[in-house]
Amino acid sequence: MRRAYLTYLALGDSLTVGVGASFLAPGFVGRYKQITEEKLDKHVFTTIYAKSGIETGEVLKIVQNKWLHEKIRGANIITISAGGNDLIEASEEFIETGEVAEITESVKGCVQNLSEIMSIIQQLKKDCGVPYRVYLLNLYNPLPQIPLADKWVQIINQKLNRFDNGSTIQIVNIYSTFDGRQSDLLSRRDGIHPNNAGYQEIAEAIIQRGYPKEFYETM
């Protein structure tokens, strides 16, 4: 008899929280859970460790907490959203100062933090004894009005691609999903976070990356 459930750990920032969705509407986490349950005919038990507005350094602190490590080891599904707030903060500083050096350092710091996050998760998942898939969302450009912002986003995304091993760790390309569609997929309230349609697109982008074959089998 097949195990009737999967465990899903959602880590990250405002996107994982679902900021921008309309009142009581789910973000991508709730939408992904629902679609997965329908596709696999299994319950998905979700735990969220996320906070609106936090940057990659704070997401790293969450992952470093030892009380979370057992949940990471035991999770079948992990999603990670981080980096967007680093970009927004750095872009605001750039607008004020015009100093490219500052944003260059911010991009480097963002990539370094994401590298440490993935390193910790990879280490914890070694010999974890459960089938799993880690989905790392890359960055979309919430600031198309700033010409250099897209360049910075693409630099970060190129660095993230190295974590994709084609099996247990996969990059979800939401950059392409949002590129040129920001007016349709971002909230009118702030123009930065996804709206309901945007979160649906993110959930579907994760779904398109597929599931391990073990998720369909007895576990």
Image: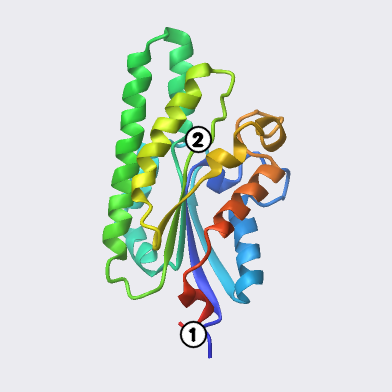
38 w.r.t. 185: above or below: below
Q: Is residue 51 left or right of residue 202?
A: left
Helix, strand or loop status at disc 2: loop
Helix, strand or loop status at disc 1: loop
Q: Which residue is mark 1?
A: 218
51 w.r.t. 155: above or below: below
Where is residue 55 shown, x and y percent of the image?
A: 42, 35
Circle count? 2
Report the disc number at residue 53: 2
Quadrant of residue 73 in the image?
A: bottom left
Where is residue 173 shown, x and y percent of the image?
A: 51, 45
N-terminal-most mark, 2 or 1: 2
Q: In the image, what residue type sits under mark 1?
A: Thr
Q: Is residue 170 left or right of residue 143?
A: left
Position of the C terminus by quadrant: bottom left
Q: Is residue 166 left or right of residue 44?
A: left
Q: Residues within 10 Å of mark 1 (few under 14, many from 20)?
A: few
Asked whether the beta carbons under mark 2 and mark 1 sit within 8 Å of each other, the answer is: no
Q: In the image, what residue type sits under mark 2?
A: Gly
**CA separation in Å, label 2 and label 1:** 39 Å
Where is residue 186 shown, x and y percent of the image?
A: 66, 34
The residue depicted at 44 percent of the width and 14 percent of the height is: 94
